[in-house]
Protein backbone atom coordinates (compact mmCIF):
# COMPACT_ATOMS: atom_id res chain seq x y z
CA UNK A 1 0.00 0.00 0.00
CA UNK A 2 2.66 2.47 1.07
CA UNK A 3 4.72 1.12 -1.79
CA UNK A 4 2.00 1.99 -4.31
CA UNK A 5 1.57 5.45 -2.83
CA UNK A 6 5.29 6.17 -3.07
CA UNK A 7 5.71 4.97 -6.63
CA UNK A 8 2.59 6.85 -7.69
CA UNK A 9 3.95 10.05 -6.16
CA UNK A 10 7.25 9.60 -7.98
CA UNK A 11 5.45 8.94 -11.27
CA UNK A 12 3.26 11.98 -10.67
CA UNK A 13 6.33 14.17 -10.21
CA UNK A 14 7.81 12.82 -13.43
CA UNK A 15 4.62 13.41 -15.36
CA UNK A 16 4.54 16.96 -13.97
CA UNK A 17 7.48 17.65 -16.30
CA UNK A 18 5.40 16.75 -19.33
CA UNK A 19 2.44 18.73 -18.02
CA UNK A 20 4.66 21.77 -17.42
CA UNK A 21 6.14 21.66 -20.91
CA UNK A 22 2.73 21.23 -22.48
CA UNK A 23 1.50 24.04 -20.20
CA UNK A 24 4.21 26.40 -21.41
CA UNK A 25 3.20 25.79 -25.00
CA UNK A 26 -0.54 25.99 -24.24
CA UNK A 27 -0.42 29.21 -22.22
CA UNK A 28 1.87 30.94 -24.69
CA UNK A 29 -0.46 29.95 -27.52
CA UNK A 30 -3.62 31.01 -25.72
CA UNK A 31 -2.16 34.36 -24.65
CA UNK A 32 -0.35 34.95 -27.94
CA UNK A 33 -3.24 34.07 -30.20
CA UNK A 34 -5.09 37.41 -29.91
CA UNK A 35 -2.04 39.15 -31.39
CA UNK A 36 -1.76 36.67 -34.23
CA UNK A 37 -5.34 37.24 -35.29
CA UNK A 38 -5.51 41.00 -34.65
CA UNK A 39 -5.37 43.45 -37.53
CA UNK A 40 -2.25 45.53 -38.11
CA UNK A 41 -3.74 48.79 -36.83
CA UNK A 42 -4.41 47.34 -33.36
CA UNK A 43 -0.87 46.08 -32.84
CA UNK A 44 2.12 48.05 -31.51
CA UNK A 45 3.80 50.16 -34.21
CA UNK A 46 0.76 49.58 -36.46
CA UNK A 47 2.39 46.63 -38.20
CA UNK A 48 1.08 43.14 -38.80
CA UNK A 49 2.50 40.54 -36.44
CA UNK A 50 4.80 39.08 -39.06
CA UNK A 51 6.25 42.49 -39.89
CA UNK A 52 6.65 43.13 -36.17
CA UNK A 53 8.31 39.83 -35.32
CA UNK A 54 10.50 39.27 -38.41
CA UNK A 55 13.18 41.90 -37.62
CA UNK A 56 13.30 40.62 -34.04
CA UNK A 57 13.75 37.05 -35.20
CA UNK A 58 16.48 38.27 -37.55
CA UNK A 59 18.31 40.05 -34.70
CA UNK A 60 17.96 37.00 -32.46
CA UNK A 61 19.47 34.65 -35.01
CA UNK A 62 22.21 37.15 -35.95
CA UNK A 63 23.34 37.69 -32.34
CA UNK A 64 23.25 33.98 -31.53
CA UNK A 65 25.11 32.97 -34.70
CA UNK A 66 27.80 35.56 -34.04
CA UNK A 67 28.14 34.29 -30.47
CA UNK A 68 28.40 30.67 -31.60
CA UNK A 69 30.97 31.49 -34.29
CA UNK A 70 33.20 33.14 -31.70
CA UNK A 71 32.55 30.74 -28.83
CA UNK A 72 32.81 27.32 -30.49
CA UNK A 73 36.48 27.48 -31.62
CA UNK A 74 37.51 28.99 -28.29
CA UNK A 75 35.49 26.44 -26.33
CA UNK A 76 36.92 23.51 -28.29
CA UNK A 77 40.45 24.82 -27.81
CA UNK A 78 39.85 25.37 -24.11
CA UNK A 79 38.49 21.82 -23.80
CA UNK A 80 41.51 20.43 -25.63
CA UNK A 81 43.82 22.44 -23.41
CA UNK A 82 42.22 21.07 -20.26
CA UNK A 83 42.06 17.44 -21.40
CA UNK A 84 45.20 17.02 -23.51
CA UNK A 85 47.68 19.86 -23.09
CA UNK A 86 47.63 21.16 -19.51
CA UNK A 87 49.36 19.10 -16.79
CA UNK A 88 46.77 16.63 -15.41
CA UNK A 89 47.40 17.91 -11.88
CA UNK A 90 45.85 21.32 -12.60
CA UNK A 91 43.30 20.19 -15.22
CA UNK A 92 40.50 19.82 -12.66
CA UNK A 93 41.03 23.35 -11.35
CA UNK A 94 41.11 24.77 -14.89
CA UNK A 95 37.86 23.01 -15.69
CA UNK A 96 36.33 24.49 -12.57
CA UNK A 97 37.41 27.97 -13.69
CA UNK A 98 35.67 27.54 -17.05
CA UNK A 99 32.54 26.32 -15.25
CA UNK A 100 32.59 29.46 -13.10
CA UNK A 101 31.82 31.46 -16.24
CA UNK A 102 28.47 29.69 -16.32
CA UNK A 103 27.72 30.58 -12.70
CA UNK A 104 27.84 34.34 -13.20
CA UNK A 105 24.36 35.91 -13.47
CA UNK A 106 23.48 37.37 -16.86
CA UNK A 107 22.74 40.80 -15.40
CA UNK A 108 26.39 41.00 -14.33
CA UNK A 109 27.51 40.12 -17.84
CA UNK A 110 25.29 42.91 -19.12
CA UNK A 111 26.79 45.52 -16.80
CA UNK A 112 30.29 44.29 -17.63
CA UNK A 113 29.51 44.47 -21.34
CA UNK A 114 28.25 48.02 -21.33
CA UNK A 115 30.65 49.57 -18.81
CA UNK A 116 33.85 47.58 -19.43
CA UNK A 117 33.96 45.70 -22.73
CA UNK A 118 31.92 48.14 -24.84
CA UNK A 119 34.09 51.24 -24.30
CA UNK A 120 37.23 49.16 -24.86
CA UNK A 121 35.87 47.84 -28.15
CA UNK A 122 35.29 51.33 -29.59
CA UNK A 123 38.83 51.75 -31.02
CA UNK A 124 38.79 48.18 -32.30
CA UNK A 125 35.53 48.81 -34.12
CA UNK A 126 36.91 52.03 -35.57
CA UNK A 127 39.83 49.98 -36.88
CA UNK A 128 37.49 47.36 -38.35
CA UNK A 129 35.57 50.11 -40.12
CA UNK A 130 38.65 51.62 -41.74
CA UNK A 131 40.41 48.37 -42.64
CA UNK A 132 37.53 45.99 -43.34
CA UNK A 133 34.80 48.49 -44.16
CA UNK A 134 34.25 46.89 -47.56
CA UNK A 135 32.59 43.92 -45.80
CA UNK A 136 28.89 44.44 -45.04
CA UNK A 137 29.55 43.40 -41.41
CA UNK A 138 31.88 46.34 -40.75
CA UNK A 139 30.10 48.89 -42.89
CA UNK A 140 30.09 51.51 -40.15
CA UNK A 141 29.87 54.28 -39.21
CA UNK A 142 31.41 52.71 -36.12
CA UNK A 143 29.52 53.31 -32.90
CA UNK A 144 31.19 55.61 -30.37
CA UNK A 145 29.36 54.06 -27.40
CA UNK A 146 30.18 50.39 -27.94
CA UNK A 147 26.50 49.43 -27.78
CA UNK A 148 26.75 47.30 -30.93
CA UNK A 149 25.80 43.86 -32.18
CA UNK A 150 29.50 42.91 -32.15
CA UNK A 151 29.88 43.64 -28.43
CA UNK A 152 26.58 41.92 -27.60
CA UNK A 153 27.68 38.91 -29.64
CA UNK A 154 31.05 38.77 -27.86
CA UNK A 155 29.41 38.87 -24.42
CA UNK A 156 26.98 36.14 -25.49
CA UNK A 157 30.00 34.15 -26.69
CA UNK A 158 31.58 34.35 -23.25
CA UNK A 159 28.28 33.27 -21.69
CA UNK A 160 27.84 30.16 -23.86
CA UNK A 161 31.52 29.18 -23.91
CA UNK A 162 31.30 27.06 -20.71
CA UNK A 163 28.32 25.08 -22.08
CA UNK A 164 30.02 24.23 -25.36
CA UNK A 165 33.30 23.57 -23.57
CA UNK A 166 31.73 21.23 -21.00
CA UNK A 167 30.20 19.01 -23.70
CA UNK A 168 33.42 19.00 -25.72
CA UNK A 169 35.52 18.32 -22.63
CA UNK A 170 33.49 15.29 -21.70
CA UNK A 171 33.86 13.83 -25.19
CA UNK A 172 37.58 14.61 -25.48
CA UNK A 173 38.28 13.07 -22.08
CA UNK A 174 36.57 9.87 -23.20
CA UNK A 175 38.39 9.54 -26.49
CA UNK A 176 40.01 6.09 -26.46
CA UNK A 177 43.46 6.01 -24.91
CA UNK A 178 44.62 3.16 -27.09
CA UNK A 179 44.14 5.23 -30.24
CA UNK A 180 46.14 8.08 -28.75
CA UNK A 181 48.86 5.75 -27.57
CA UNK A 182 48.88 4.07 -30.96
CA UNK A 183 49.33 7.38 -32.68
CA UNK A 184 52.13 8.34 -30.33
CA UNK A 185 53.82 4.98 -30.79
CA UNK A 186 53.86 5.68 -34.51
CA UNK A 187 55.66 8.93 -33.81
CA UNK A 188 52.77 11.36 -34.05
CA UNK A 189 53.29 14.71 -32.37
CA UNK A 190 50.83 15.96 -29.76
CA UNK A 191 48.90 17.99 -32.32
CA UNK A 192 48.82 15.09 -34.78
CA UNK A 193 47.49 12.82 -32.04
CA UNK A 194 44.76 15.32 -31.26
CA UNK A 195 43.89 15.90 -34.91
CA UNK A 196 43.78 12.23 -35.83
CA UNK A 197 42.25 10.60 -32.75
CA UNK A 198 40.68 13.10 -30.34
CA UNK A 199 38.96 15.50 -32.74
CA UNK A 200 37.30 12.85 -34.95
CA UNK A 201 36.07 11.07 -31.83
CA UNK A 202 34.59 14.24 -30.36
CA UNK A 203 33.19 15.72 -33.54
CA UNK A 204 29.50 14.98 -33.06
CA UNK A 205 29.72 16.06 -29.41
CA UNK A 206 31.20 19.35 -30.50
CA UNK A 207 28.35 19.81 -32.98
CA UNK A 208 25.69 19.11 -30.37
CA UNK A 209 27.50 21.28 -27.83
CA UNK A 210 27.56 24.09 -30.36
CA UNK A 211 23.82 23.70 -30.87
CA UNK A 212 23.18 23.75 -27.13
CA UNK A 213 25.23 26.94 -26.92
CA UNK A 214 23.33 28.39 -29.85
CA UNK A 215 20.06 27.58 -28.08
CA UNK A 216 21.25 29.37 -24.96
CA UNK A 217 22.40 32.40 -26.94
CA UNK A 218 19.05 32.60 -28.77
CA UNK A 219 17.16 32.93 -25.49
CA UNK A 220 19.64 35.01 -23.53
CA UNK A 221 17.98 38.21 -22.46
CA UNK A 222 19.61 40.62 -20.07
CA UNK A 223 23.06 40.97 -21.62
CA UNK A 224 21.53 41.92 -24.97
CA UNK A 225 18.87 44.13 -23.36
CA UNK A 226 21.50 46.18 -21.59
CA UNK A 227 24.20 46.31 -24.26
CA UNK A 228 22.45 46.71 -27.58
CA UNK A 229 21.22 50.10 -28.76
CA UNK A 230 18.23 49.05 -30.81
CA UNK A 231 16.43 50.71 -33.67
CA UNK A 232 14.55 47.90 -35.35
CA UNK A 233 16.85 48.16 -38.37
CA UNK A 234 17.46 44.98 -40.32
CA UNK A 235 21.17 45.10 -41.06
CA UNK A 236 24.24 42.90 -41.06
CA UNK A 237 26.33 45.85 -39.91
CA UNK A 238 27.80 44.65 -36.61
CA UNK A 239 29.50 47.83 -35.48
CA UNK A 240 26.90 50.54 -36.10
CA UNK A 241 24.66 52.57 -33.82
CA UNK A 242 21.42 51.17 -35.26
CA UNK A 243 20.89 47.47 -34.52
CA UNK A 244 18.05 45.01 -34.81
CA UNK A 245 16.70 44.01 -31.40
CA UNK A 246 16.28 40.40 -30.33
CA UNK A 247 13.03 38.73 -29.32
CA UNK A 248 14.11 38.26 -25.71
CA UNK A 249 15.56 41.76 -25.33
CA UNK A 250 12.47 43.30 -26.88
CA UNK A 251 10.24 41.52 -24.37
CA UNK A 252 12.41 42.63 -21.45
CA UNK A 253 12.41 46.23 -22.70
CA UNK A 254 8.75 46.59 -23.55
CA UNK A 255 6.90 44.19 -21.27
CA UNK A 256 7.00 46.18 -18.02
CA UNK A 257 5.36 49.19 -19.69
CA UNK A 258 2.93 47.40 -21.98
CA UNK A 259 -0.73 46.56 -21.61
CA UNK A 260 -3.59 45.10 -23.62
CA UNK A 261 -2.84 43.71 -27.03
CA UNK A 262 0.82 44.77 -26.84
CA UNK A 263 1.26 42.16 -24.09
CA UNK A 264 -0.29 39.53 -26.33
CA UNK A 265 2.05 40.52 -29.15
CA UNK A 266 5.07 40.17 -26.85
CA UNK A 267 3.88 36.77 -25.64
CA UNK A 268 3.41 35.70 -29.25
CA UNK A 269 7.04 36.64 -30.01
CA UNK A 270 7.96 34.61 -26.91
CA UNK A 271 6.17 31.67 -28.51
CA UNK A 272 8.28 32.15 -31.65
CA UNK A 273 11.43 32.17 -29.50
CA UNK A 274 10.26 29.07 -27.64
CA UNK A 275 9.74 27.28 -30.95
CA UNK A 276 13.16 28.29 -32.32
CA UNK A 277 15.05 27.21 -29.18
CA UNK A 278 13.00 24.02 -28.87
CA UNK A 279 13.95 22.92 -32.38
CA UNK A 280 17.62 23.80 -31.79
CA UNK A 281 17.78 21.97 -28.47
CA UNK A 282 15.91 18.90 -29.68
CA UNK A 283 18.34 18.70 -32.58
CA UNK A 284 21.29 18.88 -30.20
CA UNK A 285 19.82 16.27 -27.85
CA UNK A 286 18.96 13.96 -30.72
CA UNK A 287 22.62 14.00 -31.82
CA UNK A 288 23.79 13.27 -28.27
CA UNK A 289 21.36 10.43 -27.63
CA UNK A 290 22.09 8.83 -31.00
CA UNK A 291 25.71 8.80 -30.00
CA UNK A 292 25.05 7.24 -26.61
CA UNK A 293 23.16 4.37 -28.15
CA UNK A 294 26.08 3.40 -30.40
CA UNK B 1 39.01 13.42 -41.00
CA UNK B 2 36.72 10.37 -40.62
CA UNK B 3 39.13 8.00 -42.22
CA UNK B 4 42.21 9.11 -40.32
CA UNK B 5 41.42 6.91 -37.31
CA UNK B 6 41.32 3.81 -39.44
CA UNK B 7 44.28 4.70 -41.60
CA UNK B 8 46.31 4.92 -38.44
CA UNK B 9 45.87 1.17 -38.16
CA UNK B 10 46.33 0.22 -41.80
CA UNK B 11 47.57 2.72 -44.31
CA UNK B 12 49.70 5.56 -43.20
CA UNK B 13 52.39 4.63 -40.72
CA UNK B 14 55.06 5.24 -43.30
CA UNK B 15 54.38 8.97 -43.27
CA UNK B 16 54.44 9.15 -39.51
CA UNK B 17 57.58 7.08 -39.20
CA UNK B 18 59.34 9.11 -41.88
CA UNK B 19 62.94 9.68 -40.93
CA UNK B 20 62.78 11.57 -37.66
CA UNK B 21 60.51 14.54 -37.08
CA UNK B 22 60.52 16.92 -40.01
CA UNK B 23 60.89 20.60 -39.06
CA UNK B 24 57.53 21.26 -40.61
CA UNK B 25 55.64 18.78 -38.46
CA UNK B 26 57.48 20.00 -35.42
CA UNK B 27 56.61 23.61 -36.21
CA UNK B 28 52.93 22.78 -36.81
CA UNK B 29 52.87 20.99 -33.48
CA UNK B 30 54.35 23.93 -31.61
CA UNK B 31 52.10 26.45 -33.34
CA UNK B 32 48.92 24.46 -32.70
CA UNK B 33 49.78 23.71 -29.07
CA UNK B 34 50.50 27.40 -28.53
CA UNK B 35 47.24 28.38 -30.20
CA UNK B 36 45.29 25.99 -27.98
CA UNK B 37 46.93 27.38 -24.86
CA UNK B 38 46.40 30.95 -26.08
CA UNK B 39 42.72 30.27 -26.74
CA UNK B 40 42.33 29.01 -23.19
CA UNK B 41 43.99 32.11 -21.78
CA UNK B 42 41.82 34.30 -24.01
CA UNK B 43 38.71 32.52 -22.73
CA UNK B 44 39.78 33.17 -19.15
CA UNK B 45 40.39 36.91 -19.57
CA UNK B 46 36.67 37.81 -19.34
CA UNK B 47 36.32 35.84 -16.09
CA UNK B 48 39.14 37.66 -14.36
CA UNK B 49 38.20 41.04 -15.82
CA UNK B 50 34.62 40.52 -14.72
CA UNK B 51 35.40 39.49 -11.15
CA UNK B 52 37.95 42.29 -10.83
CA UNK B 53 35.66 45.01 -12.23
CA UNK B 54 32.64 43.92 -10.21
CA UNK B 55 34.71 43.96 -7.02
CA UNK B 56 36.28 47.33 -7.87
CA UNK B 57 33.05 49.02 -8.86
CA UNK B 58 30.80 47.23 -6.37
CA UNK B 59 32.66 47.97 -3.15
CA UNK B 60 32.02 51.78 -3.19
CA UNK B 61 28.27 51.11 -3.23
CA UNK B 62 28.35 48.71 -0.31
CA UNK B 63 27.43 50.24 3.01
CA UNK B 64 25.45 49.32 6.08
CA UNK B 65 22.58 51.29 4.59
CA UNK B 66 22.67 49.10 1.47
CA UNK B 67 21.79 46.06 3.56
CA UNK B 68 19.43 47.61 6.11
CA UNK B 69 17.34 50.26 4.31
CA UNK B 70 14.85 50.04 1.50
CA UNK B 71 14.50 52.78 -1.14
CA UNK B 72 11.06 54.06 -0.26
CA UNK B 73 10.59 57.75 -0.93
CA UNK B 74 14.31 58.51 -1.11
CA UNK B 75 15.86 60.22 -4.10
CA UNK B 76 19.23 58.81 -5.07
CA UNK B 77 19.88 57.29 -1.65
CA UNK B 78 18.39 54.36 0.15
CA UNK B 79 19.42 50.75 0.32
CA UNK B 80 18.57 47.43 -1.21
CA UNK B 81 17.30 45.50 1.80
CA UNK B 82 13.91 45.08 0.11
CA UNK B 83 15.66 43.61 -2.94
CA UNK B 84 17.80 41.25 -0.86
CA UNK B 85 14.75 40.10 1.09
CA UNK B 86 12.81 39.67 -2.15
CA UNK B 87 15.57 37.58 -3.69
CA UNK B 88 15.63 35.35 -0.60
CA UNK B 89 11.85 34.91 -0.49
CA UNK B 90 11.36 34.35 -4.24
CA UNK B 91 14.25 31.87 -4.34
CA UNK B 92 13.00 30.08 -1.21
CA UNK B 93 9.49 29.65 -2.61
CA UNK B 94 10.94 28.46 -5.94
CA UNK B 95 13.05 25.91 -4.03
CA UNK B 96 10.04 24.67 -2.04
CA UNK B 97 8.25 24.00 -5.33
CA UNK B 98 11.20 22.59 -7.26
CA UNK B 99 13.10 20.38 -4.82
CA UNK B 100 10.31 17.86 -4.04
CA UNK B 101 9.16 17.65 -7.67
CA UNK B 102 12.72 17.44 -8.95
CA UNK B 103 13.90 14.77 -6.53
CA UNK B 104 10.75 12.67 -6.81
CA UNK B 105 10.98 12.83 -10.61
CA UNK B 106 14.62 11.77 -10.43
CA UNK B 107 13.63 8.87 -8.16
CA UNK B 108 11.02 7.85 -10.70
CA UNK B 109 13.48 8.05 -13.57
CA UNK B 110 16.20 6.13 -11.78
CA UNK B 111 14.27 3.63 -9.61
CA UNK B 112 10.96 3.01 -11.38
CA UNK B 113 10.93 4.27 -14.94
CA UNK B 114 11.35 1.82 -17.77
CA UNK B 115 11.36 1.73 -21.53
CA UNK B 116 9.87 4.34 -23.74
CA UNK B 117 8.29 6.57 -21.07
CA UNK B 118 11.60 6.84 -19.27
CA UNK B 119 13.45 7.72 -22.47
CA UNK B 120 10.83 10.29 -23.39
CA UNK B 121 10.98 11.85 -19.92
CA UNK B 122 14.78 12.06 -19.99
CA UNK B 123 14.55 13.72 -23.39
CA UNK B 124 11.99 16.25 -22.22
CA UNK B 125 13.96 17.07 -19.09
CA UNK B 126 16.86 17.89 -21.40
CA UNK B 127 14.58 19.99 -23.58
CA UNK B 128 13.32 21.76 -20.47
CA UNK B 129 16.84 22.82 -19.50
CA UNK B 130 16.89 24.72 -22.79
CA UNK B 131 13.80 26.85 -22.18
CA UNK B 132 14.85 30.50 -22.41
CA UNK B 133 14.46 32.18 -19.03
CA UNK B 134 12.32 34.97 -20.46
CA UNK B 135 9.90 32.39 -21.86
CA UNK B 136 9.61 30.86 -18.39
CA UNK B 137 8.67 34.33 -17.15
CA UNK B 138 6.05 34.80 -19.85
CA UNK B 139 4.57 31.39 -19.02
CA UNK B 140 4.24 32.25 -15.32
CA UNK B 141 2.70 35.60 -16.18
CA UNK B 142 0.22 34.06 -18.63
CA UNK B 143 -0.73 31.41 -16.03
CA UNK B 144 -1.44 33.95 -13.30
CA UNK B 145 -3.10 36.39 -15.68
CA UNK B 146 -5.78 33.85 -16.40
CA UNK B 147 -6.69 33.65 -12.71
CA UNK B 148 -5.99 37.18 -11.50
CA UNK B 149 -6.45 39.36 -14.56
CA UNK B 150 -4.05 41.45 -16.66
CA UNK B 151 -1.13 43.31 -15.10
CA UNK B 152 -0.75 40.86 -12.22
CA UNK B 153 2.59 41.19 -10.40
CA UNK B 154 3.34 38.86 -7.47
CA UNK B 155 6.43 37.43 -5.85
CA UNK B 156 5.06 33.92 -6.24
CA UNK B 157 4.63 34.38 -9.99
CA UNK B 158 8.37 34.90 -10.16
CA UNK B 159 8.91 31.79 -8.05
CA UNK B 160 6.83 29.73 -10.47
CA UNK B 161 8.90 31.06 -13.38
CA UNK B 162 12.13 30.19 -11.57
CA UNK B 163 10.81 26.71 -10.71
CA UNK B 164 10.43 25.99 -14.38
CA UNK B 165 14.16 26.67 -14.76
CA UNK B 166 15.17 24.96 -11.52
CA UNK B 167 13.27 21.66 -11.75
CA UNK B 168 15.27 20.22 -14.68
CA UNK B 169 18.56 21.19 -12.99
CA UNK B 170 17.52 19.42 -9.79
CA UNK B 171 16.39 16.33 -11.73
CA UNK B 172 19.62 16.12 -13.71
CA UNK B 173 21.90 16.38 -10.70
CA UNK B 174 19.75 14.10 -8.49
CA UNK B 175 19.65 11.49 -11.25
CA UNK B 176 23.46 11.54 -11.51
CA UNK B 177 23.79 10.97 -7.77
CA UNK B 178 21.15 8.23 -7.56
CA UNK B 179 22.81 6.46 -10.45
CA UNK B 180 26.05 5.95 -8.52
CA UNK B 181 24.36 4.38 -5.49
CA UNK B 182 25.51 0.77 -5.95
CA UNK B 183 22.88 -1.84 -6.74
CA UNK B 184 24.17 -4.27 -4.13
CA UNK B 185 22.88 -1.95 -1.39
CA UNK B 186 19.39 -2.15 -2.88
CA UNK B 187 19.66 -5.91 -3.36
CA UNK B 188 20.80 -6.45 0.22
CA UNK B 189 17.81 -4.47 1.39
CA UNK B 190 15.37 -6.44 -0.77
CA UNK B 191 16.93 -9.68 0.48
CA UNK B 192 15.91 -8.66 4.00
CA UNK B 193 12.34 -8.29 2.76
CA UNK B 194 12.28 -4.49 2.86
CA UNK B 195 9.66 -3.01 0.54
CA UNK B 196 10.89 -0.87 -2.32
CA UNK B 197 9.71 2.49 -0.98
CA UNK B 198 11.47 1.83 2.34
CA UNK B 199 14.62 0.76 0.50
CA UNK B 200 14.58 4.06 -1.35
CA UNK B 201 13.84 6.27 1.65
CA UNK B 202 16.07 4.45 4.16
CA UNK B 203 18.94 3.17 2.01
CA UNK B 204 19.21 4.95 -1.34
CA UNK B 205 18.42 8.51 -0.31
CA UNK B 206 20.65 8.58 2.81
CA UNK B 207 23.53 7.16 0.76
CA UNK B 208 23.04 9.83 -1.87
CA UNK B 209 22.28 12.60 0.61
CA UNK B 210 25.44 14.69 0.29
CA UNK B 211 25.23 14.58 -3.50
CA UNK B 212 21.58 15.58 -3.44
CA UNK B 213 22.27 18.56 -1.18
CA UNK B 214 25.16 19.62 -3.40
CA UNK B 215 22.99 19.40 -6.50
CA UNK B 216 20.22 21.43 -4.90
CA UNK B 217 22.65 24.14 -3.79
CA UNK B 218 24.10 24.42 -7.28
CA UNK B 219 20.57 24.60 -8.72
CA UNK B 220 19.76 27.44 -6.32
CA UNK B 221 22.96 29.22 -7.34
CA UNK B 222 21.89 28.95 -10.97
CA UNK B 223 18.52 30.63 -10.46
CA UNK B 224 19.26 33.14 -7.73
CA UNK B 225 20.69 35.65 -10.22
CA UNK B 226 17.98 35.30 -12.87
CA UNK B 227 16.70 38.65 -14.05
CA UNK B 228 14.58 38.28 -17.15
CA UNK B 229 11.83 36.01 -15.76
CA UNK B 230 11.43 38.26 -12.70
CA UNK B 231 11.37 41.42 -14.76
CA UNK B 232 8.10 40.30 -16.35
CA UNK B 233 6.54 38.69 -13.27
CA UNK B 234 7.35 40.36 -9.97
CA UNK B 235 7.35 44.02 -10.96
CA UNK B 236 9.37 46.88 -9.54
CA UNK B 237 8.84 48.38 -6.11
CA UNK B 238 10.86 50.57 -3.75
CA UNK B 239 9.67 49.27 -0.43
CA UNK B 240 9.93 46.08 1.56
CA UNK B 241 7.36 43.39 0.84
CA UNK B 242 7.65 40.06 2.60
CA UNK B 243 4.41 38.49 1.33
CA UNK B 244 4.93 36.63 -1.95
CA UNK B 245 1.15 36.37 -2.42
CA UNK B 246 0.43 40.06 -2.18
CA UNK B 247 1.73 42.76 -4.44
CA UNK B 248 4.98 43.51 -6.21
CA UNK B 249 8.28 42.29 -4.87
CA UNK B 250 11.75 43.62 -5.68
CA UNK B 251 14.83 41.41 -6.06
CA UNK B 252 18.55 42.00 -6.42
CA UNK B 253 18.92 41.25 -10.12
CA UNK B 254 16.01 43.45 -11.22
CA UNK B 255 17.17 46.08 -8.71
CA UNK B 256 20.60 46.18 -10.37
CA UNK B 257 18.96 46.44 -13.80
CA UNK B 258 16.68 49.29 -12.75
CA UNK B 259 19.42 51.27 -11.02
CA UNK B 260 21.34 51.06 -14.29
CA UNK B 261 18.38 51.73 -16.54
CA UNK B 262 16.70 54.58 -14.67
CA UNK B 263 19.47 56.10 -12.59
CA UNK B 264 17.54 59.32 -11.98
CA UNK B 265 19.31 62.52 -11.04
CA UNK B 266 22.15 61.04 -9.01
CA UNK B 267 23.56 58.93 -11.78
CA UNK B 268 26.80 57.78 -10.21
CA UNK B 269 25.13 56.83 -6.92
CA UNK B 270 22.64 54.70 -8.85
CA UNK B 271 25.39 53.01 -10.87
CA UNK B 272 27.31 52.35 -7.66
CA UNK B 273 24.27 50.60 -6.25
CA UNK B 274 23.79 48.58 -9.43
CA UNK B 275 27.39 47.32 -9.11
CA UNK B 276 26.96 46.73 -5.38
CA UNK B 277 23.91 44.58 -6.14
CA UNK B 278 25.89 42.73 -8.82
CA UNK B 279 28.70 42.12 -6.32
CA UNK B 280 26.23 40.85 -3.72
CA UNK B 281 24.72 38.47 -6.28
CA UNK B 282 28.12 37.14 -7.35
CA UNK B 283 29.06 36.68 -3.71
CA UNK B 284 25.87 34.68 -3.06
CA UNK B 285 26.47 32.52 -6.14
CA UNK B 286 30.13 31.88 -5.28
CA UNK B 287 29.36 31.08 -1.63
CA UNK B 288 26.68 28.60 -2.72
CA UNK B 289 29.07 26.97 -5.19
CA UNK B 290 31.93 26.67 -2.72
CA UNK B 291 29.64 25.52 0.10
CA UNK B 292 28.15 22.89 -2.22
CA UNK B 293 31.61 21.49 -2.88
CA UNK B 294 32.50 21.55 0.82
CA UNK B 295 29.28 19.75 1.78
CA UNK B 296 30.03 17.09 -0.77
CA UNK B 297 33.59 16.59 0.38
CA UNK B 298 32.68 16.59 4.07
CA UNK B 299 29.56 14.43 4.07
CA UNK B 300 29.76 12.16 1.05
CA UNK B 301 29.27 8.50 1.80
CA UNK B 302 32.25 6.40 0.88
CA UNK B 303 31.04 3.89 -1.67
CA UNK B 304 33.13 0.84 -2.13
Image (cartoon, coloured by chain):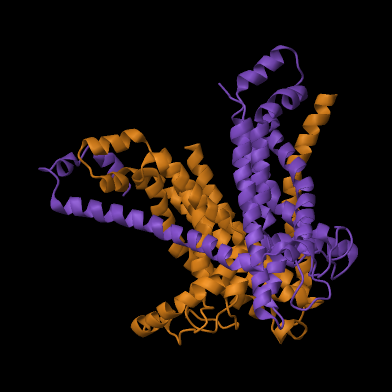
Q: Position of residue B21 (x, y in %)?
A: 14, 46
Chain with colour orange in the figure: A
Q: Is residue B54 above or below residue A58?
A: above
Q: Nearer the viewer, residue B3 or A260?
A: A260
Quadrant in which residue A187 is drawn: top left
Answer left or right for B85 relative to B184: right
Of B124 and A78, the residue lying toward us: A78
**Residue A72 visible:** no
Disc count in the image? 0
Q: Residue at x 41, y 60 (%)?
A: B42
In the displayed image of the protein, which residue is found farthest to the left? B19
Quadrant assignment, res B112: top right
| Left or right for A43, reference A153 | right
Q: Residue at x 68, y 43 (%)?
A: B216
Q: Position of residue B185 (x, y in %)?
A: 64, 19
Viewer-nearest residue: B70 or A188: B70
Chain B colour as displayed: purple
In the rendered view of the protein, which quadrant contains the N terminus of chain A?
top right
Residue found at x 55% / y 84%: A242
* x, y percent for residue B248: 84, 66
**In this rendering, position of residue A243 left or right of residue B263:** left
In the displayed image of the protein, which residue is found farthest to the front?
B64
User: Which residue is found at the position 76% from the left and 49% from the top?
Assistant: A19
Residue A157 vertical placement versus B162 (above, below): below
Q: Is residue A98 above or below residue A240?
A: above
Q: Is residue A279 visible?
A: yes
Where does the image place residue B177, in percent across and percent down from the top left?
Answer: 62, 34
Amino acid sequence: MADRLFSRTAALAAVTILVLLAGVAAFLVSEGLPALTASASELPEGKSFVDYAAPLAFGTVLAATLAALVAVPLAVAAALFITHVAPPRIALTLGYLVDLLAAIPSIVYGLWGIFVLGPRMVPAMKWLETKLGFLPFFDGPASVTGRTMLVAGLVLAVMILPIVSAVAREAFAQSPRRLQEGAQALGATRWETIRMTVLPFGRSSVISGAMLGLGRALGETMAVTIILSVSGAVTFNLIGQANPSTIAANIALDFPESSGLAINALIATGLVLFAITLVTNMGARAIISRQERV
Amino acid sequence: MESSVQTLGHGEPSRLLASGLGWRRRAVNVVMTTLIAAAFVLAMIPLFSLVFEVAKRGIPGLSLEFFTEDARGVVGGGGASHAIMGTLIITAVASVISIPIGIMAAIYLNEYGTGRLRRALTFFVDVMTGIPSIVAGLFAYALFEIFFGPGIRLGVTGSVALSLLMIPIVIRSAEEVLKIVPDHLREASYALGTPKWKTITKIVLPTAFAGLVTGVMIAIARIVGETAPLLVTTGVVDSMNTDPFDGRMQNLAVYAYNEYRSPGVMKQAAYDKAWAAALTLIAIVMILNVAARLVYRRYKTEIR
